[in-house]
Image (spheres, grey):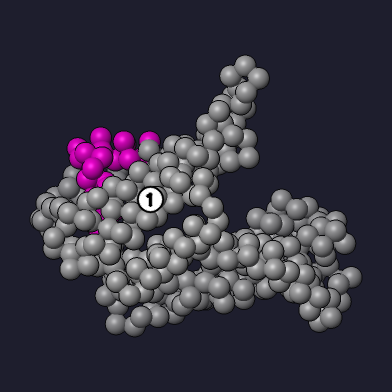
């Protein structure tokens, strides 16, 4: 059976390649701390499940120290000239989007079709993580397709992704870390505390009021934490499950899906979502560091209103 370990090993190999290439990049003034940062992540991907919790915690602290004091730098990357990029863009045209579109397409094939494939009595894919495994395979397929399309090697993909990852720096890990923080908050009882506040603030017998509290709460918590993954376990465990599913008998699947979308609306408002809102402004060299947020917050607000209505009509129909 192909399990989630395959995904961790694949990610470990990728981060190890980043570390190895970064250590050899003499143009990077902080090449050793940069290589150590990505190398430590690679080691955690390979070994975390076999290490004591204290050791994993020490590694996380080491990552914070490397990012905060040593810093991550940028070096020299194997890039083509501007004229060559323009010529390739004109030659390939919209075909450049094909590899990217393969990622959701192949993931859907795994999630909807291959999850039923069995070898004897054993499923081919780990049932609980079919989508994540499918996403990993989809990225491999997209990389192969991109190499065929552009007549480049897989290593070119690693090299160009290294350029982007080094530019983003430690913020590339924010979704993972904030999702973990959300789980910690839920384990600490924050969700139950939120549920208590909601019960005192709104009439819990009014289903629409609870829907508004859940959707807006997801958005606000995502603004504070900078990530919807951090908000999800807290708000879903504190409001959606006990009040909407338990008390109003809402359909849990669409409720959770639309609740997550509501959290994404909050991400559009938040400077805490540095990898989404501040890093692009820096990469694009915008004069206003908050220009991305100013441009997208009206869309986020409109989507949040739509999510509230969809949640009420679909999850509580």
Q: Which residues are magenta?
A: 141-165
Residue plotted at (87% across, 62% down): 247
| Residue 201 locus on image (x, y percent) | 81, 82
Q: Secondary structure at mark 1?
A: helix
| Residue 244 locus on image (x, y percent) | 81, 62
In this picture, residue 30 sits left or right of residue 190? left
Q: Is residue 24 magenta?
A: no
Q: Residue at the top extreme?
A: 120
User: Quarter-wise, where is residue 266 in the image?
Assistant: bottom right
In this picture, residue 171 sits left or right of residue 2? left
The residue closer to the viewer here, 130 or 265, is 130
Q: Is residue 166 above or below residue 279?
A: above
Is residue 46 visible in the rendered image? The answer is yes
Q: Is residue 166 above or below residue 118?
A: below
| Residue 157 locus on image (x, y percent) | 26, 46
Q: Is residue 107 above or below residue 179?
A: above
In this picture, residue 103 sits left or right of residue 20? right
| Residue 2 locus on image (x, y percent) | 52, 31
What secondary structure is the stretch in magenta mostly built from? helix
Residue plotted at (49% across, 57% down): 56
Residue plotted at (30% across, 59% down): 36
Quarter the N terminus occupies: top right
The residue closer to the viewer here, 53 or 174, is 53
Is residue 171 visible in the rendered image? The answer is no
* Total marks placed: 1
Dot 1, crowdedness within 10 Å: few (<14), some or many (≥20)? many
Residue matched to label 1? 42
Residue plotted at (38% across, 71% down): 65
């Amino acid at each position: 059976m192909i399990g989630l370990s395959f995904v961790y090993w694949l990610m470990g190999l990728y981060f190890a390649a980043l570390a190895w290439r970064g250590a050899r990049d003499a143009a990077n003034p902080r090449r050793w701390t940069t290589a150590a940062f990505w190398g430590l992540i690679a080691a955690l991907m390979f070994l975390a499940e076999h290490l004591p919790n204290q050791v994993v915690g020490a590694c996380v602290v080491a990552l914070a120290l490397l990012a905060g004091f040593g810093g991550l730098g940028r070096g020299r990357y194997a890039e083509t000239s501007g004229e060559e990029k323009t010529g390739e863009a004109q030659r390939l045209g919209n075909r450049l989007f094909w590899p990217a579109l393969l990622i959701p397409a192949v993931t859907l094939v795994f999630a909807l079709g291959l999850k039923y494939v069995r070898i004897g009595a054993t499923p081919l894919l780990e049932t609980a993580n079919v989508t994540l495994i499918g996403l990993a395979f989809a990225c491999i397929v997209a990389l192969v397709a991109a190499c065929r399309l552009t007549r480049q090697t897989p290593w070119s993909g690693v090299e160009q992704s290294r350029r982007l990852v080094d530019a983003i720096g430690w913020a590339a890990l924010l979704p993972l870390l904030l999702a973990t923080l959300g789980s910690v908050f839920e384990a600490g009882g924050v969700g139950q505390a939120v549920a208590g506040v909601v019960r005192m603030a709104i009439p819990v017998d009014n289903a629409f009021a609870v829907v508004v509290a859940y959707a807006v709460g997801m958005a606000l918590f995502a603004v504070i934490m900078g990530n919807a993954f951090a908000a999800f376990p807290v708000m879903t465990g504190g409001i959606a499950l006990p009040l909407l599913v338990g008390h109003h008998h809402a359909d849990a699947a669409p409720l959770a899906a639309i609740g997550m979308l509501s959290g994404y609306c909050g991400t559009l408002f938040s400077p805490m979502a540095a990898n989404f809102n501040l890093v692009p402004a820096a990469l694009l060299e915008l004069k206003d560091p908050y220009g991305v947020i100013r441009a997208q917050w009206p869309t986020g607000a409109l989507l949040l209103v739509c999510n509230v209505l969809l949640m009420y009509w679909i999850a509580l129909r």
